[in-house]
Amino acid sequence: MSQQNPLTLITPIIPEKIGQLYQLLSDMKYKLEKGEHELFEKSNNIHYLRWLIIDDKNSVFFEGTKRLPKLIFSSNFDGSIEGHIDDLCGDMEHHLIDQIYSCCVNFPDVANRNLISRADYLKKSMIKVSAFYKGSPGRSLVQIRQEQDLRMFLRQKLDTQNWEGKSALQIHKQLKKEVKSESRFEWLKEPFKMPKMNWFKFALLVLVLLALLPIIIIWILIVEFGYERKDEYFTKTRSELDPKKIKVLEEYEDLTSGEDLGKRNYEGDLVKNKQINYQNQFSQLVEMKPGKVRLITFKGMMLFAKNLIPIKFVDGELMGIPTIHFARWVLFDDNKRVLFFSNFDGSWQQYLGDFIDQSGWGLTGIFSNTKVFPKTRFLFTGGAYDEEHFLAWSRATELSTQIWYSAYPSLSIKNVNNNSQIRVLFSKNLNNKKVLKLFQLI
């Protein structure tokens, strides 16, 4: 199975070159919007990628801190981190890396630039993720594209050929014969199993939590009465936020879309109308509340998420939310700040609304340890459930992303996982009931 990994790089920018860097990223964004993705597709293993600038004193997102401006890079890719960095420094045309990172502090000078020195520089800029979620674990970019190709081939055959008088089993047999005759589907010979929840590890995690429950309860009381009730909390509504900032954020939303074709009945007819499915990104920066208690609480929540996610959330849903491709939390700057990145389907409002409905307690448990979060009670209540203030807080802490790349903008995470189910079912010898289920997926 493919190993999907995250990479986060944080590099200080030379203040005098920040204008040059903005222009480089703007030119790249323009090319991406025109569909020129070749630069990021050479390695054929990058699912998502973004660059953004923080701590720029001339930006509407600047919070008045005395820090050097920084360039953030984030990617989701297949394979090893070392291989991915080598791709960035080599196969992805190193002149792009040179142009961008020559605007950053301590990048090798021209005389000393080579694959090794570039890679060493990027490795020194790496920040480990605190927790990481993937909506289609085990699937490489190549596999995702292959399975989409199979689905489109099967759907085209079902739509255009005359199947009158043939049973579902006969249709399936004929489709398998036609697929087998196509050399581009040789990869179907490789077996693939859908990831499943690890019940043993989940039960073990529950037992550990039960054993720790007295300590957890005492800790929640310490946080509530010793800290939370004294902290400042967020009280603004979205109408009170800076309209210039909101405009910048909204300009980079709902740009990539595809058709959600829905399911079919056993005759191959659509059972619901086509809908537009948007893909979006979310970048967020928050500051930690001071003190070891808050840091320990945050790290405890991250440890819990880090262990729970690969055990339970392996079927394309995070806490019941079926729209997230990848998400990560990154603690950096000597544990003073947190970055949160996600790639998701649907609108910003729908995405955060799902979070509130399905996992408000989790968001509250994590982000109540950061400064000026909506009023929280006993670590897990209030907070994100105060929808009006939580949505405003989310916008207030959101960052503008200068560059965002998606390798499959027309596919929702439901499509990706659905295509894998088609691949698994199609390759088997099925009874009539299973064949009808297959046709519904197609």
Image: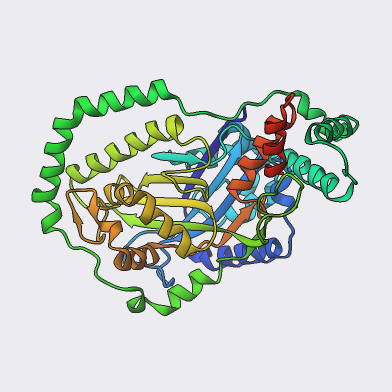
Determine whether 52 is above or below 57 in the image: above
Placement of the C terminus among the 4 image quadrants: top right
Name the image quarter holding the N terminus. top right
Q: Decide which of 28, 330 is in the foreground and name it.
A: 330
Please give the name of the residue rendered at 71% of the width and 41% of the height, measured from the top-left corner: 44
Residue 324 x, y percent position in the rendering: 51, 49
Give the percent coordinates (x, y) of residue 309.
42, 35
Q: Position of residue 251 (x, y in %)?
A: 55, 71
Residue 206 lies, with reference to residue 415, above or below; the image says above
Q: How is the image coloured?
A: rainbow
Is residue 114 left or right of 222 when viewed as pictured?
right
Is 76 left or right of 224, judged from the image as shown? right
Camera-side residue: 276 or 267? Answer: 267
**Residue found 79% across the figure and 31% down from its top:** 169
Q: Is residue 323 visible?
A: yes
How many dots with numbers? 0
Residue that protrudes farthest toward the left in the picture: 225
- Residue at image position (74%, 58%) is 36
Please, is residue 3 above or below residue 245 in the view?
Answer: above
Looking at the image, residue 115 sits to the left or right of residue 379; the answer is right
Residue 91: in sight, yes or no? Answer: no
Q: Position of residue 397 (x, y in %)?
A: 37, 63
Image height check: is 422 above or below 1?
Answer: below
